[in-house]
Image (cartoon, helix red, strand yellow):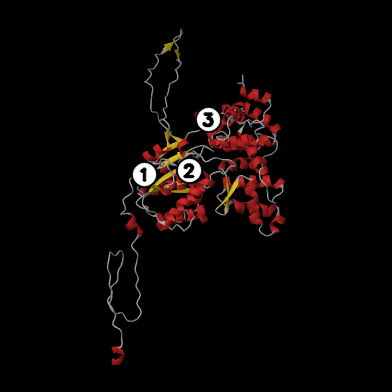
Amino acid sequence: MTESSEEVRPVASANLISGDIAGTAVQAGSIMGGLHFHITAAPQSATNRTVDPPTEWADLPELPPKIKSLLRAQIQAAEEMPYRLPGARRPSLSTVYVRQDVTSGTEAQPAEQGRPLPVLDSRGQLIDPHHPPVTRLAVRPPSRSMREALDEDDHLLVTGGPGQGKSTLSLRLTADVARCWQATDDRPPPLQEVVVPLRLTARELAARLDLPFFEALAATIRGEYGALLAATIQPDDLGERVGGCRWLLLVDGLDEVADTVQRDRLVSVLSTWASDSPDYRVVLTTRPIEGATLAPFQRIGSARYELLPFDEQALRRFAQHWFSDSPGAPAKFLRQLRKAHLDELVRVPLLATIAAIIFEQFDDRPLPDNQYELYETYLGYLRSAHSVPAGLPDEHCGRLLEHLGRVRLEEDTSLTTAACHWTAERLPELCRTTGWREKLVTYLTAVGPFISRGGDLWFLHHSFAEHLAATAKARLLPPEFDPGHADFVELLHAARPEDRGRYARRVLLHHTRLHPAEADALLSHLHEGEPAKHLLAARLLAWHIPAEAEAFFATATPGP
């Protein structure tokens, strides 16, 4: 380089840096040639872990935009799920009560009773004295609100039977906590601790456990909420607290994971992270599950609760809320329930909801007096209440719905894929038109108990899948009841346990509904058997098996 060129070179002015600096800073004089700076941002965790959690809901930190988007998506999802039954009203979390589930031991024992003195007869033989029955007391703790349960324990296991309101509880709790972050709800917060809610279904999360935990959470969020999200949630967003606040992870419907190996693994994974991570609280909902599946979650100190069914007062509040714009309707609805002997059945919130919808739509008819006819009436209403797009012929529609019920109970696969495979095998001519898959999904959401969410079909409620699957399986049985046939032998054996036998009993019931003349033969066979078969007969009669009076009284009357 020549001297003259150096004389015209501009003199670089000094770099001036002032004010507070966060992160990496570089100060340099004159720089010639290319220069690259590689700067690694400070880990987000270092920031979040130094933030003290807020002590009350009135003092909330600012959340990242993508977390705000996640909260909005969950509020929107709560408006649509768990079952978007026509006319269904949004339940209030304040009316949901839980009771701690005492599964073993007693809290009160009677005083020790003395042994009776030996008694001899006139021939000096020992008489075996009559032992009075020992009274055993089992005391349940009093019912408590959901807020009390959340404030008392970090991790909860919430159990409830079919239609008891487990999904409704998880959705409403998630949405109510999310609304607290929006400062648009004047109601008291659902729990004292300031938390960030995250609700996922167990079936979706269990399908992704081949990934690291936070990647599995992020992938499940994308699958659950999809286009409702304004930005993609990354695994790093979930690996720690947000604004100093813990995550409240709600995993709904463990029992709906069909693969028992996946189900057990999900419980193990949730138990590990609930125990090891200080950043997560876990609420797990499920039907009661027999065996050791839930043991890992209970070993970490989680509290077990069960949802209370409606009592008389709660049912009255339900009716007043549902028919609030129709004076006189609540009392009329309750009278019809009593007249149809549905008092016990509608203690299940889902069945109370279905009964209320049927009452509104068919107020000129009496309510069905059993669960089978309640479901059948409602499913018939779905197929007739809406304008139905062109689709399957009627004779095929019912069979496809039943097939999808079996798929949901037996497999963890896409219902949309299963519906397309079934249709392609049986009705190939329908599959030659453009966009037939989309038309099929539209048709099924119009005539069946489904919604379309995340690119797939979902049952409005798992009990609809069970009802349809029971009919599908009943069709596979011989039309005539034969107690020696292998299928009936297996079914009768499976139907005996109180909880695990529920689905098998439903298949037997649906078989008698398909073939009413076989109900008497079934009851007669059970009446002639041992006490366990008598109990099975009684349970089927309670479900209104279509028996003739003679068979009914033969079963209801003790034998000689």
Residue at the outermost top position: 122
Q: Decide: few, some or many residues near mark 1? Use Cα within 10 Å; few <14, some 14-19, many ≥20.
A: some
Instruction: Quadrant for the N terminus, please.
Output: bottom left
Under mark 3, the amino acid is Arg
Disc 3 element = helix
Q: Point out residue 238 in the picture as x, y percentages from the top left corner.
A: 41, 54
Of marks 3 and 1, the one in the foreground: 3
Residue 436 visible: yes
Nearest to the observer: residue 418 or residue 534:
418
Q: Point out residue 260 in the picture as x, y percentages from the top left corner.
A: 51, 46
In whole angstroms, how far apart are the C-alphas of marks 2 and 1?
A: 17 Å
- Dot placed on the residue nearer the N-terminal end, 3 or 1: 1
Residue position marked by numbered label 1 in the rendering: 193
Q: Point out residue 480 in the picture as x, y percentages from the top left corner.
A: 70, 35
- Residue 172, disc: 2
Q: Is residue 378 above or below residue 417?
A: above
Whether label 2 touches label 1, CB < 8 Å: no
- Dot placed on the residue nearer the N-terminal end, 3 or 2: 2
In whole angstroms, how far apart are the C-alphas of marks 3 and 2?
A: 21 Å
Q: Is residue 362 above or below residue 413?
A: above
Whether label 3 touches label 1, CB < 8 Å: no
Under mark 1, the amino acid is Glu
- Residue 316, disc: 3
Nearest to the observer: residue 559 or residue 330:
330
